[in-house]
């Protein structure tokens, strides 16, 4: 598990910073009279990828440590999140 | 101008949510969702979608800020995350069996009971001052800021922790909250986990809890982008302030604050029911 906290910290800091930048751009365009949804969409997507990335980093750390019970628990979490993203993608396709 | 005023209100409330989120390991959705429904007049699903996005923002900010302080428990977090994710998956089943009103009443009752328990045990601490003791597979060690020494803790009543996490996941997607308001007090009051560890581990978990439902709301087009942006910006400001305060705050005061927040959350949810 060595280094995991530092890697998670870097990932989350950058996902939050990038999301913040996108939101500020989106709000500036909106109030500047050029409303656009793409900066908000990109920001929300990057924000959502932060916790997902954290789970994947944990998965890799448990694998490196050969810590199989916790590796399997993390695989379970990844599977549930994958199902959510697949369901969301399917709904998005139907809506479009 | 009305739009600007609304965005400022959302940012201010987001800051409050971020402040409590960073201090207590809760996402703040429990305050934001009723605000969006009762004050802004949004339908519940749109409010829940906004609540979930702010929970992810709180989780990422607080987790990044707490990293390196040794208060995370990754092993405990991942085991409880599995129960939470399963609870979230079963949320669809619960939604078809219970009305939103019934869920709110259940939440208010449970939150009030946990609030009483937290206040009754406010003086009790879950730390073992001997750092050489074996904390077990799920326990750990950290530098306690109250005593300024390394302390240990062991996890007790794991089935109860799993049940609380399952319940938190179950109500999360339906009410638009992260579930930290259920997990943190139970982990602290019943499962032997110090409040700082419970709050830090919960702040990490609530991001995944919210992520197990938020993409569905987003895909359905229920997320209002500019309000989400304002709320997230507010959350980031509040979280930064909360982390500075949290370093100096004593565990006992945080517990009293948690009890108070539970009563407020129970009242807010009951009011909207």
Image: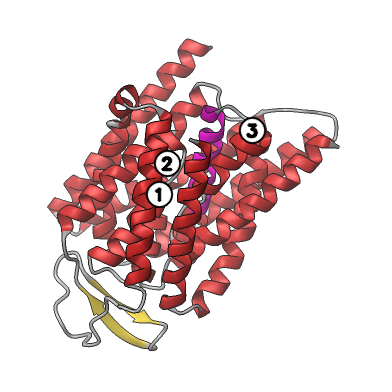
Q: From the image, tell me which residue sits under label 2.
A: B210
Whichever of callouts 3 and 2 sits on the residue coming sooner in the sequence is: 2
Q: From the image, tell me which residue sits under label 3.
A: B225
Q: Mark 2 lies on which chain?
A: B
Q: Give the residue at x 67% y 35%.
A: B40
Q: Position of residue A70 (x, y in %)?
A: 18, 53
Residue count near mark 1 (Cα–Cα under 10 Å), binned few <14, some 14–19, many ≥20: many
B153 vs B79: above or below: below
Helix, strand or loop for the magenta stretch, by majority: helix
User: Are labels 3 and 2 on one chain?
Assistant: yes
Residue count near mark 3 (Cα–Cα under 10 Å), binned few <14, some 14–19, many ≥20: many
Q: From the image, tell me which residue sits under label 1.
A: B206
Q: Position of residue B14 (x, y in %)?
A: 62, 50
Mark 3 vs mark 2, CA separation in Å: 17 Å
Q: Give the residue at x 33% y 41%.
A: B169
Relative to B234, is B105 on the left or the right? left
B84 vs B16: above or below: above
Of B209 and B165, nearer the camera is B165
Over which residues does the magenta segment extend? B44-58
């Amino acid at each position: 598990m060595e280094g995991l906290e530092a890697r998670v910290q870097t990932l989350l800091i950058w996902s939050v910073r990038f999301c913040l930048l996108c939101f500020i751009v989106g709000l500036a365009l909106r109030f500047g009279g050029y409303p656009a949804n793409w900066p908000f969409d990109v920001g929300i997507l990057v924000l959502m990828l932060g916790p997902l990335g954290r789970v994947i980093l944990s998965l890799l750390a448990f694998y490196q440590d050969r810590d199989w019970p916790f590796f399997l628990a993390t695989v379970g979490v990844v599977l549930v999140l994958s199902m959510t993203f697949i369901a969301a993608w399917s709904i998005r396709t139907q809506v479009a | 101008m009305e739009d600007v005023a609304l965005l400022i209100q959302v940012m201010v409330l987001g800051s409050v949510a971020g402040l409590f989120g960073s201090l207590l390991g809760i996402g703040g959705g429990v305050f934001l969702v009723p605000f969006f429904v009762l004050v802004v007049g949004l339908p519940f699903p749109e409010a829940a979608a906004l609540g979930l996005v702010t929970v992810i923002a709180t989780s990422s900010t607080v987790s990044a800020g707490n990293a390196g302080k040794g208060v995370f428990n990754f092993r405990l977090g991942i085991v409880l995350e599995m129960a939470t994710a399963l609870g979230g998956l079963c949320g669809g089943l619960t939604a078809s069996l219970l009305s939103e009103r019934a869920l709110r009443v259940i939440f208010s009752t449970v939150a009030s009971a946990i609030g009483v328990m937290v206040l009754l045990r406010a003086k009790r601490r879950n730390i073992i001052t001997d750092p050489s003791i074996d904390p077990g597979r799920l326990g750990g060690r950290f530098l306690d800021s109250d005593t300024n020494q390394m302390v240990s803790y062991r996890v007790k009543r794991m089935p109860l922790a799993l049940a609380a996490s399952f319940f938190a996941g179950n109500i999360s997607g339906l009410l638009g909250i992260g579930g930290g308001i259920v997990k943190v007090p139970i982990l602290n009051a019943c499962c032997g986990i110090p409040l700082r560890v419970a709050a830090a581990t919960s702040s990490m978990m609530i991001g995944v809890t919210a992520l197990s439902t938020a993409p569905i709301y987003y895909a359905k087009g229920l997320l209002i982008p500019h309000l989400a942006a304002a709320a997230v910006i507010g959350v980031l400001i509040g979280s930064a302030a909360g982390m500075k305060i949290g370093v100096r705050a004593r565990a006992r005061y945080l517990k009293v604050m948690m009890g108070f927040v539970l009563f407020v959350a129970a009242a807010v949810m009951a009011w909207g029911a």
